Image (spheres, rainbow, N blue to C red):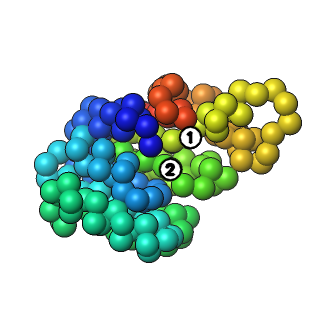
Amino acid sequence: MSPGTGAALRLLAASVDAKAVAEIGTGCGVSGIHLLHGMRPDGVLTTVDQEPEHQQFARQAFRACGFASNRARFIPGGALDVLPRLADAGYDLVFCDADRLEYSDYLAESLRLLRPGGLVVFEGIFASGRTVDSGPQPTEVLRLRELLRTVRESQELVTSLLPVGDGLLCAVKR
């Protein structure tokens, strides 16, 4: 994750005064650290990843950054198995940085999870520039284009594509 992307995540979390954030794709914890820095001091990050090792690295990184253990909740498993078990309208922000082939499914779940005024953010939308390339593209890029079309046409969302890192697609739920 680029420093600019991290700064944008901190800003976005702060802009919605995030107390509850869901993160799809824990990774090694870098994005979670940025989100936690932008969240309210009493906020909780719920992070989902199917790789237990990723969550262990993130847990250590959060601790090394001084975050109390009660600031993060780690849920192992595939996002599409875990997300349906999370509370409707219980989240201020949902950050998606996992399987791009499932981004459209993550959008549907995110809209259910978000309170009105909540924000969903997708990382990697530019796909290293392939999203705007006119040549033949792999399925991942076609799915990203489908996601872009869906959010652009939605009456339920106010959207923006931020040109930081590999692209952040942001959408506020009305």
Q: Which mark is residue 20?
A: none
Q: Which residue is mark 2?
A: 97
Q: Name the amino acid type tagged 1.
A: Gly
Of pointers 1 and 2, the one earlier in the residue sequence? 2
User: Left or right: where does residue 45 sit relative to residue 67?
Assistant: right
Please count the marks in the image. 2
Q: Which residue is mark 1?
A: 124
Residue drawn at x 45%, y 58% as measured from the top left: 27
Work out which quarter of the rendered image holds the C terminus and state it. Answer: top left
User: Left or right: where does residue 18 sit relative to residue 51?
Assistant: left
Secondary structure under the numbered disc 2 in the rendered image: loop
Secondary structure under the numbered disc 1 in the rendered image: loop
Q: Position of residue 6 (x, y in %)?
A: 36, 38
Residue drawn at x 86%, y 36% as measured from the top left: 136
Q: Looking at this view, is 114 or 103 the one in front?
A: 103
Dots 1 and 2: beta carbons under 8 Å?
Answer: yes
User: Left or right: where does residue 144 sit relative to residue 37?
Assistant: right
